[in-house]
Image: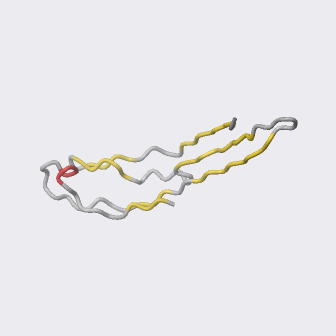
Amino acid sequence: AVYTGKRKLTNSTARGQTDWGPAPGYWRLDAILGYKFQLPKSKLPWNTSIKISNLLDEQDGYYVLAYHRYTVNPGRTWQAVVGVRF
């Protein structure tokens, strides 16, 4: 779980604009699932994993705070990884 709390605007986010209020806080839930295995007659260990960011597909987290607007985060993204150690 990732939490970004309510925060005041700074010079880099306000860009000389009037103080239009604090940026809202939000939660994001990420998940990762992995498995390690070894193939028969092989000495090499294998790793597989899948990572899902923004698991609940919340799109109300904001990351650009300039010029009196919020920009919505992208929805759910995922990544699959397969690796071997030798």
Q: Residue at x 39, y 60 (%)?
A: 4
> Measured along the vertical axis of the image, is residue 56 above or below residue 84?
below
> Measured along the vertical axis of the image, is residue 46 above or below residue 8?
above
Q: How is the image coloured?
A: secondary structure
Report x, y in % for residue 55.
56, 52
> Measured along the vertical axis of the image, is residue 1 above or below residue 39?
below
Query: Where the C terminus falls, by quadrant?
Result: top right
Q: Left or right of 8: which side holds 74?
A: right
Q: Residue at x 45, y 50 (%)?
A: 59
Q: Residue at x 53, y 48 (%)?
A: 53
> Measured along the vertical axis of the image, is residue 10 above or below residue 46?
below
Report x, y in % for residue 77.
54, 43
Q: Residue at x 29, y 62 (%)?
A: 7
Report x, y in % for residue 25.
37, 62
Q: Left or right of 65: which side holds 2?
A: right
Counting the numbered discs, the total is 0
Report x, y in % for residue 68.
22, 50
